[in-house]
Image: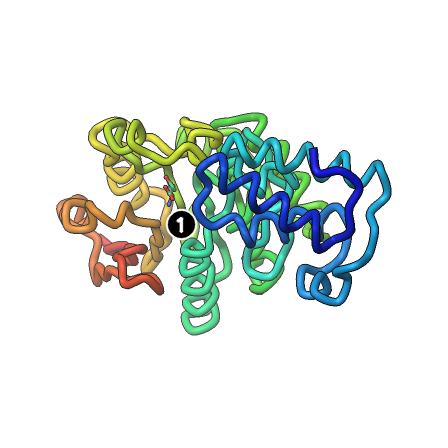
Amino acid sequence: MFGDGNVYSLLKRAKRFLESKGLSEPESDVEVLLSFVLQTKRSKLPLMRSQKLTDIQVLQYERYILRRSKREPVAYIMGLAGFMDFEFKVNKNVLIPRPETEILVETALKIAKKENKNSVLDLCTGSGCIAVSLAKLGKFKDIMASDVSGSALEIARENARSNNVLDINFVKSNVFSGISGKNFDIIISNPPYVSHEEYDALEPELKYEPEIALAADDSGLFFYKKIAGKAGRYLNDNGFILIELNAYKAGEIKQIFSTCSYKNIEIVKDYAGLPRMLKAESNSL
Ligand code: GLN
């Protein structure tokens, strides 16, 4: 497809090809994928413009570009995604970690340090990016991470191992159903929250992600109601809940949590100025 080529001409042809398939800004995709093939940093590419690739590398690159032309996300093509400066394996069984979700991790770390909190439960862990980052960056004594999907848990466990984290307790559980007799200082979650109508309108890239990780019943509110209703039973006194928000339903979600009598409910915005996280404290009754 791209003939024999040096870095410069391969990038140019791949970019033109993806543009012809309707991708609007393929520049970073073609560069990221080529540096992945060459196992080098993207920032090194400008210094390698005239370097020739081997036939095998060209073939591999063409396959990746073809996959990208069908709108498969770059992270799935590479099988890797970055989050909080760590690397996570991803495949079609888990959501690709989003930079916005780092706000949850950063907030949990701050709370743990300031309030001396030791235990955390990560619900709907998916790739495990939240739990593994907390284990790497915090000083928690007890980290549990759960997911309803066995294949997601497999990836999460692999990500813990590859990041040298050995002490996360992974549990297969439909939200709280498999968590018994435990009290946590912090419950953290990025649950599915896209309504089915919103899901239908998502761009093709997101349709590669597991629908079960994105879409939720009850106009996207199902998991907020479930977690708000039950988290109190799993939180210690003065425990915290941190949950990622569907940015368009922040008001409704806040309402759900105040009805369930949490206190100090705060909505935190992300770098794009969208409401991205709800933070609340359990009421000691
Ligand atoms: N924020 C994700 C998106 O980009 C959704 C993540 C989720 O449903 N938890 O659509």
Q: What is the total number of numbered labels drawn onto the structure image?
A: 1
Ligand 1 closer than 8 Å to the CB at disc 1? Answer: no
Q: Position of residue 204 (x, y in %)?
A: 42, 32
The image position of residue 10, as x and y in percent, is 70, 47
Q: Can residue 166 be seen in this view?
A: no
48 with respect to 77 (left or right):
right
Side of 159 relative to 272 (left or right): right
Image position of 26 (left or right of 103): right
Which quadrant of the figure has residue 154?
Answer: top right
Residue 213 image point, x, y percent: 42, 33
Secondary structure of residue under mark 1: strand
In the displayed structure, 139 sits above or below 193; it is below
**Outermost residue, bottom direction?**
114
Question: Which residue is drawn at the image coordinates 62% and 43% (left, top)?
Answer: 14
Taking the spot 32% from the left edge, 60% from the top edge, the residue there is 238
User: Looking at the picture, how far across and down is residue 141, in whole percent?
Assistant: 58, 57
Task: Compare residues 16 and 116 and report the one nearer the observer.
Answer: 16
Between 176 and 224, which is closer to the camera in this rendering? 224
Residue 99, above or below 206: below
Identify the amino acid type marked 1.
Answer: Ile
| Front-lying residue, 5 or 157 | 5
Q: Nearer the viewer, residue 149 or 208?
A: 208
Residue positioned 58% across, 43% down in the render:
75
Tell me if residue 237 can be seen: yes
**Image quarter (top left, top right, bottom left or bottom right) of the N terminus:** top right
Residue 135 lies, with reference to residue 18, above or below; the image says below
Residue that mark 1 sits on: 187
Q: Quadrant of residue 200?
A: top left
Ligand 1 shows up in the quarter that is top left
Residue depicted at 35% across the width and 54% down the height:
242
